[in-house]
Image: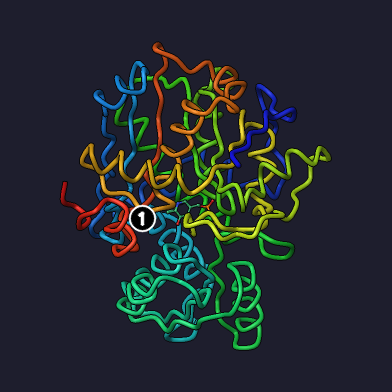
Amino acid sequence: MARFALNPFCVPEPDWSAPELAYTEAIRRGDQFAFHHALPGYAPSPLRDLPELAAELNLASLAVKDESDRFGIQAFKGLGASYAIDSVLRALGPDRPDPVTFTAATDGNHGRAVAWTAKRLGQHAVIFMPDDTAPSRIENIEAEGAEVRLIKGTFDHCVRACADTAKREGWQVIADTAYPGYMEVPGYIMTGYSTIFAEIADQTDRTYDAVFLPAGVGGLAAAGTVSFVQRHGADRPRLVCVEPDDSACFLESIDHGDGEPHQATGAQRSMMVGLCCGMPSLLAWPVIRDAMHLFLGIEDEYAIAAIRTFHSHGITSGESGASCLAGLLAVLQRDDLAPAREHLGLGQDSHVLVINTEGATDPANHARIVGSEPGQR
Ligand SMILES: Cc1ncc(COP(=O)(O)O)c(C=O)c1O
């Protein structure tokens, strides 16, 4: 079932001056931008125009910010982990253990980014993953020299196992989700993600009418939301949060109506594994609640359609990576989403932006979906 929720909490000019939302000010200052520019291998990810697909979908234009080859690790996540680990190392100072052990829970991409950063800095990483994770995602993390520990259960169980083990062992948790007592590092991670949106502002003068953002724990979607609000205020594009229907913690929290984050009710079995998170990050929630216009919960069939569509336009995308285009396809095609389409005002005058957040991180599944190897058309 595809679902949508209009956002009754959305305000034109949100107030994010609460001390715990200090990361929004860091994003405004662009604290992370010079850091990323100085990293070996840094290059802005491409902002691609897809005029043929825009014409097929009866839109004025469609752009995709393509993160599928960021830092050579196939997802945007290196932007967050690199900035957060640098910040933690600086806070620990010169008397820290050598090496420091960094640990994270992951469905794949965040853990790979933590492992990649730790290796680059000569540190150690231990990564917790659900035991049904695709083998290629485990191998990618081990290839960065990290130890992988497989946990029975969902991503949420991995978050708990990671936090408990780190407490016992004295390791540094690099979590992309904020929970009670753990708010600082996720703020660095979200500040790191905002480089994506600073790059977009450098790459184009276009103002978009609608921007689709994916949400797992909501870190990326919140970084995007903050960036568009700070740049455009009340005139920002219509912001759309895309989640798997069976892991729609933001959509369901909005529907709850009390303005608080809630655990998702679904089974979290979607193939969009990077988005299978049951609980909103406490740092992402208030920002998304105050400024996102629309929430979509979509089924895997739209992710499959989006992977194939990207592929036929020369773009490699994984299951979670394709979710923004999947949300756009669903909202354009489904009768039951017509009120959502109207809320966005989508039509032949609309300029739309989607993010492709990952490449083919499960190459076997990608090949099954497109009927050929990743990268080939
Ligand atoms: C490919 C991909 N896209 C989107 C997301 C969602 O990011 P967040 O958890 O910050 O909402 C993730 C998270 O792991 C991901 O791996």
- The answer to whether 229 appears left or right of 38 in the picture is right
- The answer to whether 153 appears left or right of 107 in the picture is right
In this view, which residue lies farthest toward the right?
A: 258
The CB of the residue at mark 1 lies under 8 Å from ligand 1: yes
- The answer to whether 201 appears left or right of 181 in the picture is left
**Front residue (pair 138, 113):** 138
Total number of numbered discs in the rendering = 1
Which residue is drawn at the image coordinates 34% and 63% (left, top)? 362
Residue 105 figure quarter: bottom right
Residue 125, position as x, y percentages in the image: 44, 79
Which residue is drawn at the image coordinates 70% and 32% (left, top)? 15
- The answer to whether 331 appears left or right of 40 in the picture is right
In this view, which residue lies farthest toward the top?
A: 349
Residue 72, above or below 306: below
Tag 1: amino acid: Ala
Residue 347, above or below 222: above
- Label 1 sits on a secondary structure element that is loop
Residue 344 figure quarter: top right
Which residue is drawn at the image coordinates 64% and 73% (left, top)? 157
Residue 42, position as x, y percentages in the image: 26, 53
Mark 1: few, some, or many residues within 10 Å (few <14, many ≥20)? Answer: many
Residue wearing tag 1: 75
Which residue is drawn at the image coordinates 29% and 30% (left, top)? 203
Residue 159, position as x, y percentages in the image: 61, 70
Residue 59, above or below 22: above
